[in-house]
Image (cartoon, grey):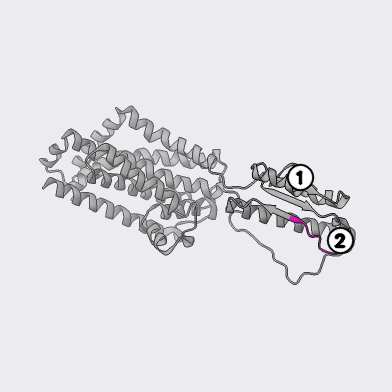
Amino acid sequence: MINLPRLKAIAQRELREILHDPTRLMLAFLAPILLMLVFSYGMNMDIKNIPYTVVDQDHSQYSRDFLAGFAHSKYFQFKGNATSNAQAEKAMVAGKTQLIINIPPHFARDLLAQKTPQVGVFIDGTNPTISSSTKSYYQAMVMGFTEHFYQQFIGTLPQQDYDVQTRFWYNQAMETKYTFVPGMIAVILLSIPAILSALSVVREKELGAIMNFYVTPTSKLEYLWGKQIPYVLLNLINLCVLFFMALLLFQVPIKGNIIAFFTGGFLYILVATSLGLLMSSFTKTQIASIMITFILTLIPSFLYSGLMTPISSLPTGAFYTAKLFPTVYFVNISVGTFTKGLGFASLWPNYLALLAFFTVFSSLSCLLLRKQER
């Protein structure tokens, strides 16, 4: 049984220590805001303003019409004309351009004869993600020009064996922020609460104050939950701050159930603070506790959460490793409620997973404290 007066006394004592420690208060409230700003603004994966160079050997009205589409597109940025491929390649080697468009001498003649002009396209393949996006953007521009040309000058569109129409659900604008900003809430709310709570028990070990706990009738669970409650309350405030930052600052509307989001956020904070207490119970120094917690939270949150790479795309070992980190489950809740419009009915397996993590982390912390007491 949990003794509520003892639990309340431990929580009040821990809260007073936090409020009298300016460093921890700054870490608790300023760090999440700074991380949200830095990562959400700095890690934008929307590929725009791709620099390109033109080698126009036709100099006709049709070649200028073809190139005008690139010049007026937000996805491309004109870097000038080149007189030859060699000159354009020097610009690519120097990193001044990522795309070279070589218009052949008989571009207009082939178009009017309803032949396919052999336009030379050279893409810098150093970064596979950027080069793949560049190729897709270029193909879209060519298709748009072809349809416009045939409708205006020929009167009919060329015969096609098939017609492919792609529709994107949930994120029709294909902007990174609709996934990345809700995902960053999951990354921040694992690392910061875990690091803060990781200092609680180990600090008393270093000071020797934990011996006072061993000689009291307070149970291990009362002690751990009493330590955990203040950090849960502080990070519930951070959850609200990050939510309104996503909503108002980054203009990411929430389409799903708000209560479902905050329910998942509360469970996720319980998991994060439990993980921090586990690291605090396991280690003997504050530096070791912070370092281990940082390595086990921030780095896996990016690599194994589905935020950077889909979980299904990971190798078999990495796929099952990702399932052992709680971030992937709250990413499903955060992105699901913000972008997909999900509610409790679709998200309940993620809630159960977070409850399981909380139970395991709390149980392991109790076992470690019991072992150390003996």
Q: Mainly helix, strand or loop, the magenta region?
A: loop
Q: Is 90 covered by the magenta stretch? A: no
Residue occupied by mark 1: 71
Residue occupied by mark 2: 110
Q: Magenta segment, which residues?
A: 115-120
Decide if residue 152 is on the left or right side of residue 237. right
Q: Nearer the viewer, residue 261 or 268?
A: 268
Categorize mark 1 by other alpha carbons within 10 Å: few (<14), some (14-19), many (20+).
some
Q: Look at label 1 and name its amino acid.
A: Ala
Q: Position of residue 61 (x, y in %)?
A: 88, 50
- The residue positioned 23% from the left and 52% from the top of the image is 364
* Residue 267 in view: yes
Q: Position of residue 188 (x, y in %)?
A: 42, 43
Decide if residue 282 is on the left or right side of residue 65. left
Q: Nearer the viewer, residue 27 or 136?
A: 136
Q: Which mark is residue 85?
A: none
> In the image as oriented, which residue stretches furthest toward the front?
86
Q: Nearer the viewer, residue 57 or 274?
A: 57
Tag count: 2
Question: Disc 1 vs disc 2: which is toward the camera?
Answer: 2
